[in-house]
Each structure stands twice: as C-alpha cells, then as structure tokens.
Image: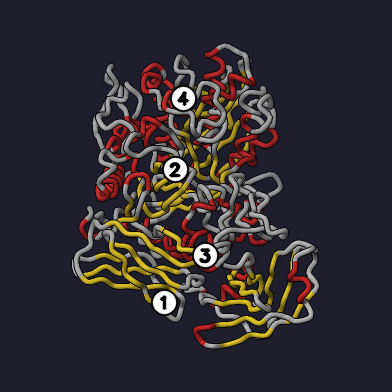
C-alpha cells in the first residue's frame, strides 16, 4: 500500500502532499503516468510548480474518470488517485449531478427500490436484513437496485468503496430509523396514517398569527394535565387542564386563537437518547436525518412506524382545530460534518470551504451546508416536497436562512406554490460569514429578490426592547419611549432591518421574543429594576405592538403569560426545569392571557390590522402626532375608526382623540379602567397602558 495519495483537485490538476526532502522530488524530471486498469488507458502528466514546498502539482490534458480505480505510476511507486477538491468545482456539478433523478427508498408490497447518488464510489452494496446486494451504477452516477418482495420494516444501510476504503453509510433520504439513528428502515408509506389536505381559513400571510412551540416544552410540565407528556401525542389530547381547571395544550392553543404553530425541529436530531429521553434535552438544531421524525417525541421510539404515525396524528389534531403547522427546518448545517452520511458519500461536496481549504463556519457549529450545489439543493427541495406531500404541513421556517443561497429558496417557493393551500415561508435573514458570495445569500438585504418569503424583523425587536446583544440596552417599552421616532415605521411594516425597506408587507415577521436569547420577561429583569407589576405592563406593551402592527405577528410560546427561563439566555440544552411551559404560571397570569386573546381576536376581526400593501396602509393608517413619548395611530376601516394609544411611561397622559364621538375602549391592559365608553374627544392613557378604542363612522 502506498504511503502517498494523489488527489484530483481540479479537472486537470493532481496534487500530492510531500515534505521538502521527500525522495519523490528527485523524479520530477520524469512526470508520472495515470493508469486506468479497467479500460487499459494511460493519462500523461506534466509537473507544475506548486504554491508551497509541501505540495507537488501535475496537470493532465484529458479529464480523468471519477468513480473508477486509478493509479499514478511513478517509477516503482504506485499511488492511488482519488477525487478531492474537484467535487467543489462547477465542472463536477455539471458533469456528475443528477437533479432530475428520484433518490431514496421506495417500498411497496411488491418490491423495494434503492437510489443513491455517489459518483466517487467505485462499488456500492446495500445491506438489507443482514444480507448484501450489489448495486448498479447508472449513467447519471446514481447507484440503484430493486429487490422483489415485501421489505416493509426491514433495516438497511449501504456499504461503499470510497477513497480506497469500505464505508458504512445510512441513507440521507431514509424515511424511517431505528432508535438513536442506528440504521435506516424501509417504510411502505401507504401503510402509514394517510393525512388529507386541509385548507385553513387563513388566505394570506398577514392573516397568520404564528406561535412558536417546542413539542416537549409544550406538555412536559407536571401541571399540564397531559398524559403523554413531552410527546407528539401529548399535543393531540383535547380538553386538558391544570389541576385548577385552566386549559392547557391543544385546547389552550385553540382558545388563544393563534392560526399557526411553528414547531421547533421535529425531524431526527442528536443529543437526546430516544429510548430514555429524560436523560437529555435539545431544541433540535443538531440535525441528523431530515426526513425522519424525532424518536424521543414518540411513545414507542423502538417501533419505526410509531413516530411517523404519531407525528401525523399531531398534525391532524392541529388541523382539526384549524391551526396550521409550520416546521422549523435546519438546512444550514449538520450535527457533525465528519460523521454525516453526506460527507461519507461524496467527501467535500456537500459542505462549503474557504479559499484556504478549511471548512466554512458561518453557522458557528463547525460546518456550512453548501445549498448552492446542485445535489445539495436537490436534497433540500426534495425534503420540502416530502413534508408537504406526506405530512401535509403548512409552512417552513428556515433556521439561519442567510446561510442558504437565494436560488434554493426560490425553488422552494416555486414548489410550495404548487399546493392548493397557502404555504407560509419565513426565515432568519442574518448575514453570516459563510463561504458564499454575499450577492447569493438569502439575507434580509435581499428581501426584494425573495418576494413571498418572510424575514424576522430585528429592527422591530430591537426598537421595542433594546439591542439584542447588549443586555443593558433599552427600547421603546422599557426605556420610557426611546426610539419613539421609529414606531411609525414599525406599525406600518416600512422597515425590515435598518436601512432596508424595499420589501412586501407580508415579508415583515414582527416579534419581540423567540426561543433564542432571553425571554422578554427575563430581559426586562436585566434592564428594568421596577416592581413586577410595572414590568408586566411593559411586557404587555411589547406583545400588544407585535399583534397590532402590520406584517405577520410572531409569538413565543408562553409569552402571553410572561414566560421565564429563569435568566438562562441560551437554553438549548438546559433541560425541562428551565424550558418547560409553566402551566401553573398560565393560571396565575390568566388576566394577561385573556388580554392577549382579545388582541388576537381584534386582529382577526378587523382587516385593517392585516393590510397587504403600502398603498392601502397609506390610505388607512394615520399616525397621531404631538404626543411624544406616547405613541398613537388611527386605522380607518369601512364605517369604523380604530385608534390605538401606547404609553411607555409612568405618567398618565391626557390627550385629544382624533375626532369627537362615542368611543368604546375594546382592549386595554388596565382592566380596572372605569371609563370603557368615552363621549367627546378627551381621553387619558394610564401609565404603561395600551388602549384600543373604536368608533362607528356615520
């Protein structure tokens, strides 16, 4: 066996790593020959000066075949030749990709078909139920095999010869896995629960009210009243209550009035032992298998079909309550690059590298998935297609979407537009230091190129509570009206992020807290030392502005009852004691829950909170000037005026209403307010109050 390896680093370039005293250097006057034994073919090479003393470069005129056993002959040395950097060249993508070929397993009662893309493998076998079957390579470099018989429920994996080694690989397109992702399992999907297409009453993105929820957090609390705590089935149980009779779980969400739940990742992820989930905890941003439900959420994780059917039952339960399901999908990275099947199947292809040949790390977790490459993009779009067709989901939230390329997001949108039902698409448009040209990134600055895709509005968030990464900073609700001058743009959805305003209304996803970073309650504990009652009022202002502004409102689960994570800023591994939704707190803070319900119902009842264009907003939304730091605006609905005031100070403010008449206070966070009906045009706004007034226009 040779101590050297010759690497294909470009279409016409071979690289060998050597030290400065290596004896190979003495042979540079006689360039080596590359031998393809199978075809009895030789390729001549020429030596080229390498950029460093530890590398030898050789060029060859003809393109070398990939997926074949090649040997570099140099005197007595026989050096194996394997593809390396060439897999990241455009020529490789053009020649060896198979974007139109169906990949993955297809299992029926009659047969099982396997389709695996790995052009760099020289042989591939599939191991089914402990027996090996050789696969055949097609012209588009997809390895395929069909086995007659009923293989439903059979474990399988691949064994491939890659870079001279035998590699055991699970199927990236697997639909089922054994516990802890030990091996892929064949699934006849026709023998799983069949979901029907459900058309929700929400017809346009701005009609949506999104509620971000972690499956385990939702029901794991001792006072949830749920039997299947922390599991998919826990969110199918109806009429669950706390010990004191307050609604929880699915019924609570229905009563709250949100239109969509956005589930933190429900596909297979790392760190939680699936047979003993109490021994671990994870938000789910360590993805393993993208088309397989997470086993720790199943009551029967050792039965492959159970997790599939239980997830489908949960989705159906939400649909029966007319609540849509948005999946949080993590296509920007994998858990461990070196251990991923993508890396094993085509080393170096599925991930980005910088100019020095180091793995790109814009995500901060050690790897960046190369969505811009044809087969990486195909996998992402295929996965979206699978969740739409098999699980009938209603939207996708893209984690670190700025790490994904624009064209991939566009193709996802085109696929989603094929559905009869509305599919919501939104993501984090942060500009991260990944090895992708900025103009190709799906970042907030490029929102105009991604019409129909929502972006989390960090301008909205930071204006309300202060700059996210400065935990002492204050905003409008907790800083006595700081940034008052920005509020007009906020409620009109004019600004998506600072300096960016060329977007659609529906692209602004308005939020003041989410699963990341401190909850708003914990943030206020850092920035404001006022009494609890005052902080609660500040908190209510933030939630109210989220629900009363144009765009898409986004609530974090439990935000409506002052959710706390006890000061933990990044709770992704912190366990149930920190992360569980505290249903006892839901009882004690029921007054605020009822306040948020009223805001949600107000938004649903009046289309002027859900306008679709800046032209309509200009006609119907008018700011009320001259009350700084109090903020106010009026919405002109057909036959009705709606006026909103937000007072971010301790002082009672006496103001003049925009017109005299018979005004009714329909929503306020000051339930003790005595004057729910106002005659004339004079009104006073209490400290830290949000007040919504309505008047018929004759």
| Residue tagged 2 | 270
Asked if residue 193 lies left or right of residue 410, the reply is left
* Nearest to the observer: residue 581 or residue 200: 581
Specify which label sits upstream in the sequence, 4 or 2: 2
Specify which label sits upstream in the sequence, 4 or 1: 1
Labels 3 & 4 near each other (Cβ < 8 A): no
Location of residue 567 (image quadrant): top right
Q: What is the secondary structure assignment of the residue under circle 2?
A: loop
Specify which label sits upstream in the sequence, 2 or 1: 1
- Most distant residue in the front direction: 76
Count of numbered labels shown in the rendering: 4
Labels 3 & 2 near each other (Cβ < 8 A): no
Q: CA distance from mark 4 to mark 2?
A: 20 Å
| Residue tagged 3 | 346
Specify which label sits upstream in the sequence, 3 or 4: 3
The label shown at residue 578 is: 4
* Percent of width and height locating residue 532: 53, 13
Q: Badge 2: how crowded within 10 Å, few (<14), some, or many (20+)? A: many
| Residue tagged 1 | 137
Q: CA distance from mark 4 to mark 1?
A: 51 Å
Seen in the picture, residue 643 relative to 343 is either above or below; the reply is above
């Amino acid at each position: 066996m040779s101590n050297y390896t010759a690497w294909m680093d470009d279409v016409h370039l071979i690289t060998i790593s050597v030290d400065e005293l290596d004896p190979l250097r003495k042979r540079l006057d006689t360039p080596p020959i590359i031998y393809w034994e199978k075809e009895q073919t030789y390729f001549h090479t020429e030596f080229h000066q390498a950029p460093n003393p530890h590398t030898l470069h050789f060029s060859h005129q003809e393109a070398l075949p990939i997926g074949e056993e090649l040997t570099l002959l140099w005197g007595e040395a026989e050096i194996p030749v394997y593809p390396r950097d060439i897999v990241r060249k455009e020529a490789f993508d053009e020649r060896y990709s198979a974007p139109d070929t169906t990949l993955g397993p297809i299992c029926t009662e009659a047969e099982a078909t396997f389709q695996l893309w790995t052009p760099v493998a020289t042989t591939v076998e599939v191991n089914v139920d402990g027996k090996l079957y050789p696969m055949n390579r097609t012209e588009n470099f997809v390895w395929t095999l069909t086995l007659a018989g009923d293989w439903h429920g059979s474990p399988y994996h691949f064994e491939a010869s890659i870079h001279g080694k035998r590699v055991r690989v699970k199927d990236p397109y697997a639909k089922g896995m054994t516990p802890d992702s030990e091996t892929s399992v064949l699934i006849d999907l026709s023998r799983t629960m069949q979901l029907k297409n459900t058309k929700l009453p929400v017809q346009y993105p701005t009609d949506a009210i999104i509620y971000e929820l972690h499956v385990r957090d939702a029901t794991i609390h001792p006072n949830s009243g749920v039997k299947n705590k922390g599991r998919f089935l826990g969110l199918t149980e109806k009429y669950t209550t706390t010990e004191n009779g307050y609604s929880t779980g699915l019924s609570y969400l229905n009563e709250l009035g949100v239109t969509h739940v956005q589930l933190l990742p429900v596909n297979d992820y790392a760190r939680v032992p699936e047979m003993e989930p109490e021994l671990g905890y994870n938000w789910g941003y360590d993805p393993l298998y993208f088309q397989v439900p997470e086993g720790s959420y199943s009551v029967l994780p050792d039965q492959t079909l159970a997790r599939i059917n239980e997830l489908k039952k949960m989705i159906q339960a939400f649909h029966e309550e007319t609540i849509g399901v948005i999946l949080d999908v993590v296509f920007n990275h994998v858990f461990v690059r070196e251990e991923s099947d993508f890396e094993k199947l085509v080393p170096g292809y599925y991930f980005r590298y910088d100019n020095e040949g180091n793995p790109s790390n814009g995500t901060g977790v050690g790897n960046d998935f190369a969505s811009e490459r044809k087969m990486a993009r195909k996998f992402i779009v295929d996965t979206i297609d699978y969740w739409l067709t098999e699980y009938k989901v209603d939207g996708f939230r893209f984690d670190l979407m700025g790490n994904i390329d624009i064209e991939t997001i566009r193709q996802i949108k085109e696929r989603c537009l094929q559905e009869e039902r509305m599919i919501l698409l939104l993501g984090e448009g942060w500009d991260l230091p990944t090895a992708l040209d900025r103009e190709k990134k799906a970042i907030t600055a490029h929102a105009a190129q991604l019409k129909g895709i929502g972006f989390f509005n960090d301008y909205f968030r930071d204006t309300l509570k202060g700059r996210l990464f400065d935990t002492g900073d204050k905003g409008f609700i907790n800083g006595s009206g700081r940034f008052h001058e920005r509020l007009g743009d906020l409620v009109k959805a004019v600004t998506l992020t600072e300096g960016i305003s060329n977007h659609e209304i529906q692209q602004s996803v308005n939020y003041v807290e989410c699963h990341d970073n401190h909850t708003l309650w914990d943030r206020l504990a850092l920035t404001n030392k006022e009494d609890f009652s005052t902080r609660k009022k500040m908190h209510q202002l933030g939630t109210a502005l989220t629900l009363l502004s144009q765009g898409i409102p986004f609530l974090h689960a439990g935000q409506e009852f002052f959710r706390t994570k006890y000061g933990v800023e990044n709770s992704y591994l912190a366990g149930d004691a920190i992360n569980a939704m505290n249903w006892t707190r839901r009882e004690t803070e029921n007054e605020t829950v009822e306040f948020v319900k009223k805001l949600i119902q107000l938004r649903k009842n009046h289309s002027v909170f859900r306008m679709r264009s800046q032209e309509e907003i200009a006609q119907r939304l008018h700011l009320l000037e001259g009350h700084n730091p109090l903020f106010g605006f009026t919405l002109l609905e057909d036959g009705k005026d709606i006026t909103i005031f937000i007072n971010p100070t301790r002082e009672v403010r006496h103001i003049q209403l925009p017109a005299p008449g018979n005004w009714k206070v329909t929503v306020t966070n000051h339930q003790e307010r005595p004057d729910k009906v106002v005659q004339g045009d004079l009104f006073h706004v209490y400290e830290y109050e949000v007040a919504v007034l309505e008047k018929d226009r004759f």
